[in-house]
Image (tube, rainbow, N blue to C red):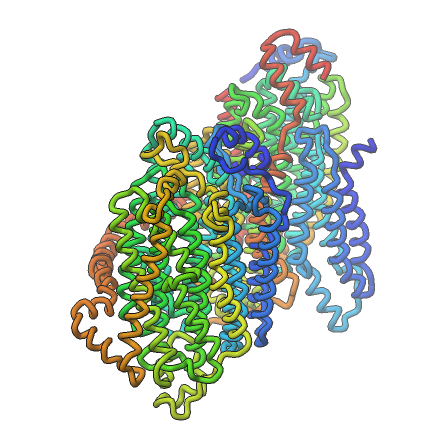
């Protein structure tokens, strides 16, 4: 069992403004990892799509953090574009999911396994 | 890496010092801006494609024929213009387009360049002039000759192959690298195969086509190996570079150095290719059978042009051959013996086209003899004259065959001279036979003399004996050519149409139905196209003697051309010291003062006399006391008296049977053995080799189970594994 | 700014065509609806012409625009006749039978618009010199293709293909996005050139290396390389053949271009001989290439479905092309330019693969519901020679070319990859490639045997020739191309070599760094540059 207080002290030497790049990166990696796990574990197409969104936003957090670290705005600009693409992808995904649901009346990813071998 | 960044001028520039440093190089090859010369090979190609399209459209008019004639005529005019503009201007290199440029390193010899470029020197001009010229004439002849195939589409097919042949032949002669030459070499072989087998419904034609193709493969293997060895040794396939290297070697030889055995092996291998294509011993067997093709094809491909490709190859690489005197001796002896053997067979054949075929083999033998005794001039001149008079002879035979429903047996034809409308054919046959027999002051007389005389003066193993053999052969040649003439064109009028349509498409000929005799059979005399072509060829055959008197110090116009080309600069290892230019040195020794010291002068008389004797014998045997076509009492008497030799001759010395015994049957047995081996071992191996990837595939197949999630697991897992490995490696 | 725009002229032409096509597709008159495909072609022609006038850029591959964009436009033009009528014919048939026109149900305009947008994305990948731009271009390439796959036929399997393609594509997009973020994090810039200079002066570090590897693997989804290849057979099989042919070219071209751009930030000027990638990357790529080609070939060997077989062979071909990427631009302009070889191979692959798919698309038979569907299996191709000699020859030529039979186009493409591999000393990989080519011969020759040698049983129903003439045109174009393009193989190879020369500034910079070797001078050079 990790001593959370100790961990917090080690991780956050100064309580205010003591959050370093690595914390952001940790969060971003966690989001990305959760996204991957969710994608692999869940079978509902909408949830799976949300997981990919989670992965995108994980990358977004990393970009913002790096932007702050390097003191330039490039990363933030990148994030704007990532959000745009994510929105486009969301629109596409929802359209596709609706279309698929009409054909099969299920959102189970496993239902689509005719093509194989 | 294939790359074309390296332009050819740059390649040439980098080797220019080598070329300039070579004392004997004719002229440093220069780039030619005369890109229009590329039309010479291109027009026949276009015509070939057009004829193919006509075939697909089902054109039944004479359009394919006229297209071909037009394309070839323009090609000839371009050649002539080119010759008149650049004839004396040394080597021209015309760049068509970049074809191959592969390199695997920066060093010399680590790149392979072969472009569609033309290497044009005077030797090329000589060949291209008669190839395109004769091809035009023979195409014109064919427009009439092949007219019976118009309906079934064979006409367009024929002309498509015909044009393709001219394209391949010009690639062969004009290519600036060995690979293009090889391509042309295979191309003419292919066209020859297709045209011999033109009557593909006839088993004999198909068998002959197969035989030609297979026998040629043996020669081509030699050429291919020679080409590869040349690439390994010279680091390039381009003529300009090869000759620059050869000039370097010549310089070392002149200074007393010796030639490595690899260099000596190249001419030996090239020679095999030449023997195959030019029908020399032991690979001559395909040429007589090739007469199954349409007669114009026999005239163009199997007499005038393609079969001289071997002569061209050796003449082109004569400097290389001169570096290995053994190869020259082999060429001379093979040529001489082929000439003799073919002449003996020719004396006893009854099919006039076959007589002509054997005479072609025999005359090719003379050309090789000429090359072997180092008179490239004589050989090239003989190629030139032979192209004309043999085309004349074949086309005359073709006219006979066309008119008499495929009849070619000289026992069944007689006295054609006296028939109406056959005057020009008779005259053509007479002129052709005179030239072939070496009758004084005909073109064949001068060209043959040049070779015969040189055989007596050139130093070499048994060359004098070879000269005597060649003289005897000349007598035989005179005999068998006039045997045909006297039997077929003189004597009592008598003819029987063929009952087996011999080689040509006479199936639908009206005369075919009553094969009984000449009652009711009306031979149709040749039309304008055939007569026109024959007249032009008669003039051509006779006029081919004129070049002998032009440019006398170089032994005639052809001599001048040869002297200016790569074949004019030879260095022989044996006589290198003191005599820089051995070929000319040898001739200079021979051409002393006095009658007997100039072999060319006394050869005029000797060979002229022998020619007369041959013709006289033919007259005696085949004209006197002959009352009907089939029997000539003296000939039959002689034939009986000379048994078994006469039978051997008639059966072609059993060479085909001999080849069957020593090649075909052992090969058959071997093939059965290999088949067994194949079944047991190779198939097993192949199956095993096929089974391994199959097993691998089966084991990997479950990964493609069609489930989205499991694919995602594969992907994610893959990323994780790779990241982990990279992390470890760092 | 204006100079930048000049680089984008082909894309602008495509975009203009996209807008027109989208509107035209909604037109009430069937004539104007029908015009949409012609406008698409016109836009591609304009893009093709404009490509030749593309200026040099300041990016990682300064000369790449004309060759690559012209190639994309040209292959796009070749695929177009195949595409024509793929999605619109059911609806047009309904309208033709007298149903009233409903602009909400017509999909024609969108389909061609997506086609153009996707090609535009590929072109943008070429122009890009920035990670943001690369990301946007990649997404622009792939988003339209997801929809194209799903709507290419009304059958369920197309939708299945769409689902798989979209979701796995999103997963891969997230992967390379994360990689891009890490690259940015490691260097503080998204400009590829600055990244390259940063890597050279400061070293790559853990984050840089992992970021680059992640980005590369993510992008390798587009080229169907291991481990991102799983979707390929399912998607190619499920989509209509024209769309499969498109998928085998456009995203693949984008993927390779982006991989070259990314690798050029670290690469090829880095090692001892000036040609090697960092060892970790080299090994990674080596393994990926070997696995990709082997996987593709051994699984293609087991297929009886021709479309799946071609899909697996598409994986294998990506493996071959990866060899070129591994080798890099080589030592000099002549010997061993692997990038040039890979890009030339891409062109060859585009031409010959199109033909194989086009022949499949040309033949139709009725499925169990009585619907006309494109044929898929090798069995359906049997005895094609007797019925349709033209198509049989097209298939034969394309299959032999894919196999790398001289003197067809595929041989020259593969030759370049082999020689570049040998010149870079990657003998092991070249041997694996050779063995793979031998394995590939088994299944390509099976296609050839089916169309040329086998005879059809009398009781089998004969596939009918499609009524869409464009598809036959595409098959013919491809078959002729396989034969004729060979004539210019040398020139194209040269153009490809020229296109893939890495920015001389980066090369010189690398050389200067090697000379200076760890002196403070480096800093100043970095700043000045």
B519 is higher (above) or lower (below) than A36:
below
Given residues B72 and C104, the one toward you in this image is B72
C11 is higher (above) or lower (below) than A80:
below
Q: At 33% from the left edge and 32% from the top edge, which residue is drawn?
A: B260
Identify the residue at the far bottom of this view.
B520
Q: At 74% from the left edge and 71% from the top edge, which residue is drawn?
A: C96
Q: Quadrant of residue A99?
A: bottom right
Given residues B131 and C28, the one toward you in this image is B131
Q: Is residue C207 visible?
A: yes
Q: Quadrant of residue B518?
A: bottom left
Residue C129, horizontal then vertical, whole percent: 70, 30
Given residues C68 and B202, the one toward you in this image is B202
Residue C519, horizontal then vertical, whole percent: 62, 7
Left or right, B319 with reference to C367: left
Residue B724, horizontal then vertical, whole percent: 50, 26
Q: Is residue B706 visible?
A: no
Q: At 46% from the left edge and 37% from the top edge, which residue is drawn?
A: B243
Given residues B551 and B411, the one toward you in this image is B551
Identify the residue at the far top of this view.
C520
Residue B103, horizontal then vertical, whole percent: 50, 35
B693 is higher (above) or lower (below) than B522:
above
Q: At 66% from the left edge and 45% from the top edge, which residue is drawn?
A: C72
B484 is higher (above) or lower (below) than A29:
below
Left or right, B279 with reference to C220: left
């Amino acid at each position: 069992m990790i001593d959370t207080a100790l961990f917090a002290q080690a991780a956050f030497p100064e309580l205010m403004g003591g959050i370093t790049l690595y914390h952001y990166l940790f969060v971003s990696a966690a989001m990305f990892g959760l996204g991957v796990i969710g994608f692999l574990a869940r079978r509902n197409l909408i949830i799976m799509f949300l997981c990919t969104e989670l992965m995108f936003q994980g990358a977004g957090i990393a970009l913002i953090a790096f932007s702050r670290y390097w003191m330039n705005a490039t990363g933030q600009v990148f994030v704007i574009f990532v959000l745009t693409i994510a929105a486009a992808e969301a629109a596409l995904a929802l359209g596709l999911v609706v279309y698929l649901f009409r054909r099969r009346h299920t959102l189970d990813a496993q239902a689509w396994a005719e093509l194989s071998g | 890496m294939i790359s074309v960044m390296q332009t050819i001028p740059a390649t040439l520039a980098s080797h220019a010092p080598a070329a300039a440093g070579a004392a004997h190089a004719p002229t440093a090859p220069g780039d030619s801006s005369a890109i229009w010369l590329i039309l010479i090979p291109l027009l026949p190609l276009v015509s070939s494609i057009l004829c193919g399209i006509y075939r697909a459209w089902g054109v039944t008019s004479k359009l394919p024929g006229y297209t071909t004639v037009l394309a070839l005529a323009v090609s000839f005019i371009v050649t002539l213009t080119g010759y008149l503009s650049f004839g004396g201007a040394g080597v021209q290199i015309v760049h068509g387009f970049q074809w191959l440029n592969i390199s695997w390193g920066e060093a010399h010899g680590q790149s392979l360049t072969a472009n569609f470029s033309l290497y044009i020197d005077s030797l090329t001009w000589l060949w291209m002039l008669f190839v395109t010229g004769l091809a035009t004439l023979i195409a014109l002849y064919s427009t009439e000759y092949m007219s019976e195939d118009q309906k079934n589409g064979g006409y367009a097919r024929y002309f498509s192959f015909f044009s393709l042949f001219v394209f391949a032949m010009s690639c062969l002669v004009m290519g600036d690298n060995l690979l293009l030459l090889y391509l042309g070499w295979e191309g003419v072989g292919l066209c020859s195969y297709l045209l011999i087998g033109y009557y593909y419904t006839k088993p004999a034609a198909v068998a002959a086509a197969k035989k030609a193709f297979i026998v040629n493969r043996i020669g081509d293997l030699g050429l291919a190996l020679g080409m590869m060895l040349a690439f390994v040794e010279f680091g390039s396939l381009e003529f300009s570079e090869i000759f620059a290297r050869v000039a370097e070697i010549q310089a070392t030889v002149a200074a007393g150095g010796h030639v490595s055995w690899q260099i000596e092996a190249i001419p030996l291998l090239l020679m095999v290719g030449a023997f195959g294509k030019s029908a020399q011993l032991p690979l001559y067997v395909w040429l007589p059978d090739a007469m199954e093709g349409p007669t114009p094809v026999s005239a163009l491909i199997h007499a005038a042009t393609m079969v001289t490709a071997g002569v061209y190859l050796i003449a082109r690489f004569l400097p290389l051959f001169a570096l290995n005197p053994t190869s020259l001796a082999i060429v001379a002896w093979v040529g001489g013996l082929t000439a003799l053997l073919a002449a003996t067979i020719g004396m006893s054949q009854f099919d006039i086209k076959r007589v002509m075929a054997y005479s072609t083999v025999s005359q090719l033998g003379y050309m090789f003899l000429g090359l072997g005794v180092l008179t490239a001039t004589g050989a090239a001149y003989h190629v030139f004259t032979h192209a004309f008079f043999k085309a004349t002879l074949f086309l005359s035979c073709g006219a006979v065959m066309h008119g008499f429903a495929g009849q070619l047996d000289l026992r069944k034809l007689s006295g054609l001279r006296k028939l109406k409308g056959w005057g020009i054919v008779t005259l053509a046959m007479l002129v052709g036979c005179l030239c072939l027999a070496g009758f004084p002051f005909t073109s064949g007389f001068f060209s043959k003399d040049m070779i015969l005389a040189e055989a007596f003066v050139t130093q070499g193993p048994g060359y004098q004996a070879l000269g005597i053999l060649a003289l005897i052969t000349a007598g035989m040649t005179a005999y068998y050519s006039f045997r045909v003439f006297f039997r077929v064109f003189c004597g009592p009028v008598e003819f029987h149409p063929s009952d087996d349509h011999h080689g040509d498409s006479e199936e639908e000929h009206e005369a075919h139905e009553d094969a009984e005799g000449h009652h009711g059979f009306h031979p149709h005399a040749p039309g304008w196209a055939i007569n026109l072509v024959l007249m032009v060829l008669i003039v051509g055959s006779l006029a081919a003697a004129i070049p002998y008197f032009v440019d006398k110090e170089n032994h005639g116009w052809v001599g001048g051309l040869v002297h200016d080309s790569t074949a004019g600069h030879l260095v022989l290892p044996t006589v290198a010291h003191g005599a820089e230019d051995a070929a000319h040195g040898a001739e200079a020794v021979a051409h002393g003062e006095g009658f007997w010291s100039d072999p060319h002068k006394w050869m005029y008389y000797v060979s002229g006399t022998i020619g007369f004797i041959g013709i006289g014998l033919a007259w005696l045997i085949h004209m006197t006391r002959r009352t009907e076509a089939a029997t000539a009492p003296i000939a039959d008497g002689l034939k009986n008296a000379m048994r078994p030799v006469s039978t051997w001759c008639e059966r072609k010395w059993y060479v085909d049977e001999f080849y069957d015994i020593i090649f075909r049957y052992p090969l058959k047995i071997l093939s059965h053995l290999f088949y067994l081996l194949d079944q047991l071992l190779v198939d097993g191996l192949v199956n095993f080799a096929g089974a391994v990837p199959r097993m691998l595939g089966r084991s990997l197949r479950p990964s493609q189970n069609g489930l989205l999630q499991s694919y995602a697991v594969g992907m994610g897992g893959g990323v994780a594994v790779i990241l982990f490995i990279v992390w470890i490696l760092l | 700014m204006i100079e930048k725009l000049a680089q984008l002229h082909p894309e602008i032409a495509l975009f203009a065509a996209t807008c027109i096509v989208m509107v035209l597709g909604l037109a009430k008159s069937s004539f104007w609806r029908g015009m949409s495909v012609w406008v698409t072609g016109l836009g591609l022609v304009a893009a093709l012409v404009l490509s030749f006038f593309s200026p040099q850029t300041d990016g990682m591959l300064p000369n790449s625009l004309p060759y690559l964009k012209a190639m994309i436009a040209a292959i796009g033009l070749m695929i177009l006749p195949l595409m024509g009528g793929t999605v619109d014919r059911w609806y047009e048939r309904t309208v033709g039978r007298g149903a009233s026109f409903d602009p909400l149900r017509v999909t024609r305009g969108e389909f061609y618009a997506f086609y153009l947008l996707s090609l535009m994305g590929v072109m943008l990948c070429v122009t890009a010199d920035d990670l943001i731009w690369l990301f946007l271009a990649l997404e622009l390439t792939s988003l339209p293709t997801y929809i194209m796959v799903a709507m290419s036929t009304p059958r369920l399997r197309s939708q299945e293909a769409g689902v798989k393609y979209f979701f796995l594509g999103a997963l891969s997009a997230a992967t390379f996005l994360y990689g891009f973020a890490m690259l940015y994090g490691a260097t503080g810039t998204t400009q590829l050139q600055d990244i390259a200079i940063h890597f050279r002066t400061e070293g790559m570090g853990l984050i840089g290396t992992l970021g680059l590897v992640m980005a590369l693997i993510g992008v390798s989804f587009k080229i169907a390389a291991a481990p991102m290849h799983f979707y390929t057979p399912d998607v190619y099989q499920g989509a209509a053949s024209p769309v499969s042919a498109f998928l085998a070219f456009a995203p693949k071209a984008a993927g390779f271009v982006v991989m070259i751009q990314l690798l050029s930030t670290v690469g090829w000027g880095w090692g001892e001989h000036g040609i090697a990638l960092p060892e970790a990357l080299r090994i990674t790529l080596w393994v990926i290439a070997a696995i990709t080609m082997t996987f593709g070939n051994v699984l293609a060997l087991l297929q009886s479905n021709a479309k799946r077989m071609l899909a697996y062979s598409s994986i294998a071909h990506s493996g071959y092309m990866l060899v070129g990427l591994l080798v890099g631009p080589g030592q000099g302009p002549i010997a061993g330019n692997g990038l040039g070889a890979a890009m030339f191979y891409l062109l060859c692959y585009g031409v010959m693969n199109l033909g194989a798919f086009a022949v499949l698309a040309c033949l139709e038979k009725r499925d169990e519901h009585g619907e006309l569907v494109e044929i898929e299996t090798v069995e359906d191709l049997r005895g094609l020679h007797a019925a349709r000699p033209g198509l049989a020859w097209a298939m034969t030529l394309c299959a032999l070319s894919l196999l790398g039979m001289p003197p067809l186009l595929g041989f020259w493409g593969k030759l370049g990859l082999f020689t570049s591999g040998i010149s870079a000393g990657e003998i092991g990989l070249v041997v694996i490639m050779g063995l793979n080519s031998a394995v590939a011969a088994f299944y390509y020759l099976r296609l050839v045997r089916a169309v040329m040698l086998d005879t059809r049983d009398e009781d089998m129903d004969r596939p009918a020739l499609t009524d869409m003439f464009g598809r036959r045109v595409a098959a013919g174009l491809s078959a002729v191309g396989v034969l004729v393009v060979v004539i210019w193989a040398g020139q194209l190879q040269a153009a490809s070599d020229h296109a893939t020369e890495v920015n001389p500034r980066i090369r010189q910079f690398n050389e200067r760094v090697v000379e200076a070797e760890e002196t403070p001078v480096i800093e100043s050079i970095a700043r000045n540059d």
